[in-house]
Image (cartoon, rainbow, N blue to C red):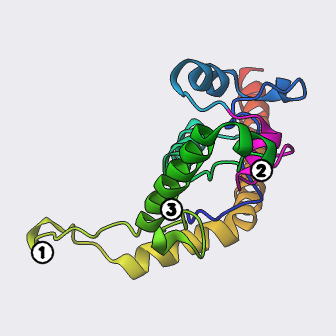
């Protein structure tokens, strides 16, 4: 199955309990709350560039773990720039300004590592399953075309054949009853 990017992460993946998610699979919820360590509020997640879709439901444990893994890698690579202190703070305390400048430089250096992700944060990579080399002697000998054709015939003519089988069974049952009547009349006449 080819996966695609959706509208956003579910509330379960962001580890936010939702009262509407009662129909969610209990195993997924238990797994998530005991093993995974992502904890983001949906409103905060939107401010740091994470799309959130509160309507989305998780259907499988694999999907939840895959999306949580993507969230964790995104958060590890996320570069948050520090908030510039107010002008009044700068006049009073120069240490705050120095801390701000060092934090800003660190953020810029960290951002330089992830230059290739600037166009799209964590683009989804489709993994093509690898092929295996098999010896010709290990391949079973059968008629592939004939097998496929037979399957197609069974699928398309199943009901027609079933009706014919029912008619034939009904006809045989009627013949059997007639035969039994004849035998019972013939046997009954001999005894007298």
Residue 128 in picture, x, y percent from top left: 40, 70
Q: Nearer the viewer, mark 1 or mark 2?
A: 2
Element under disc 1: helix
Residue that label 1 marks: 136
Q: Nearer the viewer, residue 155 or 18?
A: 18
**Which residue is the site of mark 2?**
47
Nearest to viewer (mark 2 / mark 3): 3
Task: Determine whether label 1 and label 2 are within 8 Å by CB.
Answer: no
Do the CB atoms of the residues marked 2 and 3 lie less than 8 Å apart? no
Residue 55 within the segment the image draws in magenta: yes
Element at label 2: helix
Question: Compared with residue 82, is residue 154 higher up or lower down, i.e. above or below?
Answer: below
Please report whichever mark, 1 or 2, sits nearer to the chain's N-terminal start: 2
Above or below, 171 relative to 154: above
Taking the magenta stretch, the answer to whether it contains residue 170 is no
Residue segment shown in magenta = 40-56
The residue that mark 3 highlights is: 108
- Mark sitting earlier along the chain (1/3): 3
Given residues 188 and 59, the one toward you in this image is 59
Q: Give 133 or 56, whichever is nearer the viewer.
A: 56
Q: Is residue 69 left or right of residue 132?
A: right
Does the rendering let one see residue 10?
A: no
User: Alpha-carbon neighbours of circle 2 within 10 Å: few (<14), some, or many (≥20)?
Assistant: few
The secondary element bearing badge 3 is classed as: helix
As rendered, which of 10 and 150 lies closer to the eye?
10
Instruction: Give the quadrant of residue 92.
Output: top right
Where does the C terminus fall, quadrant-wise? top right
Q: Farthest front residue? A: 91
* Residue at (71% x, 45% y) in the render: 90
Q: Give how far apart the Cα atoms at labels 2 and 3 are.
A: 19 Å
């Amino acid at each position: 199955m080819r996966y695609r990017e959706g509208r956003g992460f579910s509330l379960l993946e962001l580890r936010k309990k939702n009262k509407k998610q009662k129909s969610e699979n209990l195993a997924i919820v238990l797994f998530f709350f005991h093993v995974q360590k992502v904890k983001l509020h949906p409103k905060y997640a939107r401010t740091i560039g994470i799309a959130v879709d509160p309507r989305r439901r998780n259907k499988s444990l694999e999907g939840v773990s895959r999306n949580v893994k993507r969230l964790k890698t995104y958060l590890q690579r996320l570069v948050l720039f520090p908030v510039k202190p107010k002008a009044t703070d700068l006049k009073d305390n120069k240490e705050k300004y120095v801390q701000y400048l060092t934090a800003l430089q660190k953020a810029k250096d960290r951002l330089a590592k992830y230059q290739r992700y600037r166009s799209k944060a964590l683009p989804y990579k489709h993994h093509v399953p690898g092929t295996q080399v098999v010896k010709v002697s290990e391949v079973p000998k059968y008629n592939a075309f004939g097998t496929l054709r037979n399957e197609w015939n069974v699928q398309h003519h199943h009901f027609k054949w079933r009706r014919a089988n029912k008619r034939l069974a009904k006809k045989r049952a009627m013949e059997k009853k007639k035969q039994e009547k004849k035998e019972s009349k013939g046997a009954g006449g001999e005894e007298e």
